[in-house]
Amino acid sequence: MASNFSKEELVMFEDVLEGFDDQLVISKAVDLTRLADDQTMERASDRIWRPMPFIATSYSGIDQTANFGDITQMSVPINLGQHRSVPGLLSSKQLRDPNQLAKYGIAAKQKLSSDINYACMTAAALQGSVVSKRTSTPTGFDDVADCDALLTEIGVETDQRYAFYSARDYNSMASNLASRVLDNSNSADAYRKAYVGEIAGFETYKNDVSYSLSAATATGVTLNAANQYYVPAGSTTDALGNTTNIDNRYQTISIAVTTNTVKVGDAFTIAGVYSVHYITKQPTTTLKTFRITAIVTGAGGTGTITITPPIVSGGGGSKAELQYQNVSATPANGAVVTFLNTVTARVNPFFRKEAIQLIPGSFAVDPQDGWQVMRGTTDLGIALTYARQGNINDFSLKYRWDVDFGVAVMNTEMAGIQLFSQT
């Protein structure tokens, strides 16, 4: 059955496709990755591993006999796990007005683009491990500059950095800027449009969707074992000789909790564990920040949790640890865990572009199966599908707009969150 759309529907689809990317504010700030062909992805269950950049290690002296060894290549799994659809139904009476479909097409564009933006935002909000804790309300430059310092001091490149603030936090920054010098163009834009723009090395944007992180409630939290460091490995081999890649973004650790429970999303530091510069391995004066990504066993008392990033202290002395060391020391048994999200607040994500990847997906819809189908790809690479099918029982029309995609945080140490009004 060949597709047979009215002129109004063809125009509607082109308008929706053309304007779809304009809605993808956050999505345009992340890295876009096109994966393998559809058949390969289907056979791989829509999962593929992407290699991560190497980090080199240098040694002093002419004689390097003892320093030759394997270089660990790490990789990250990317999944196409999200499919969003906007379905609808129009009666035969409603179909007398061709504008009905056009109006719903606009609404579908807004909702689907919002879904993609929200997926990118929540990925950074839940897995970004760099945490900027601010004890006051937003003031502007100093807030963004703190994000800049946290990334720069660990060696994250200074270009292509983006920060997305909730409407209220962003407007507070604009208010501070507007109150400075009104004859300055930036101040005037802040006053007239509540616009901040580029500040402290970040392109800043007002986010119309927000995520709230509730306050941590657990108290008396400590590490419950010694030598809880992580040894990176590119892959593992089973007894049959089969090699499987390893996801090195996470580590499971054991903790003890005196009261209440920990939860996914909590941000914390560990006493005596400072961040280091990725390249030079020199320690900073800033405690390394971590996020809880999963509760493995128990959330109160004694239990195990999954955190990001892993604690790569070099405690095992392997070359892989020297390559990817990210902290100054292995935490001691009983080391105190201090939570940073002390007050429930809106999460403001920030990241370098390559830290988060948006992956367009695909699915098969054949018009020969009994429905009318239009498909198109936006400039950003997102495939948009519009399908309709009539119902002879009541002359109604079912229709749907669909997108398929995945979002991956490639490096949780190149993404983070800023929280205001914390104690």
Image: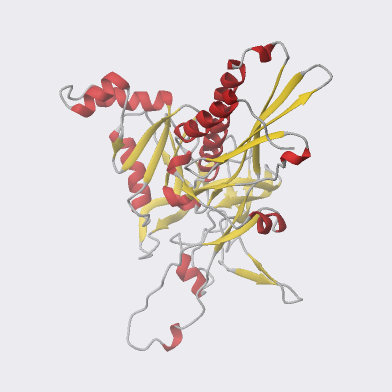
Query: According to the image, what is the colour scheme of the structure?
Result: secondary structure
Q: Quadrant of residue 200?
A: top left
Q: Quadrant of the C terminus?
A: top left
Q: Nearer the viewer, residue 211 or 243?
A: 243
The x and y percentages for residue 67 are 44, 82
Residue 186 seen in render: yes
| Label total for image | 0
Q: Residue at x 26, y 24 (%)?
A: 189
Looking at the image, residue 225 lies above or below residue 181: below
The x and y percentages for residue 140 are 31, 31
Left or right of 107? Residue 140 is left
Left or right of 316? Residue 138 is left
Of all residues, the one furthest to the right in this rendering is 393
Q: Nearer the viewer, residue 208 or 138?
A: 208
Q: Residue at x 67, y 35 (%)?
A: 373
Residue 137 seen in render: no
Q: Residue at x 67, y 15 (%)?
A: 95
Of all residues, the one furthest to the left in this rendering is 183
Q: Quadrant of the N terminus?
A: top right
Left or right of 47? Residue 391 is right
The x and y percentages for residue 134 are 39, 35
The x and y percentages for residue 302 are 68, 48
Of all residues, the one furthest to the top in this rendering is 93
Q: Quadrant of residue 169?
A: top left
Left or right of 279? Residue 20 is right
Q: Nearer the viewer, residue 319 or 385?
A: 385
Looking at the image, residue 89 lies above or below residue 358: above
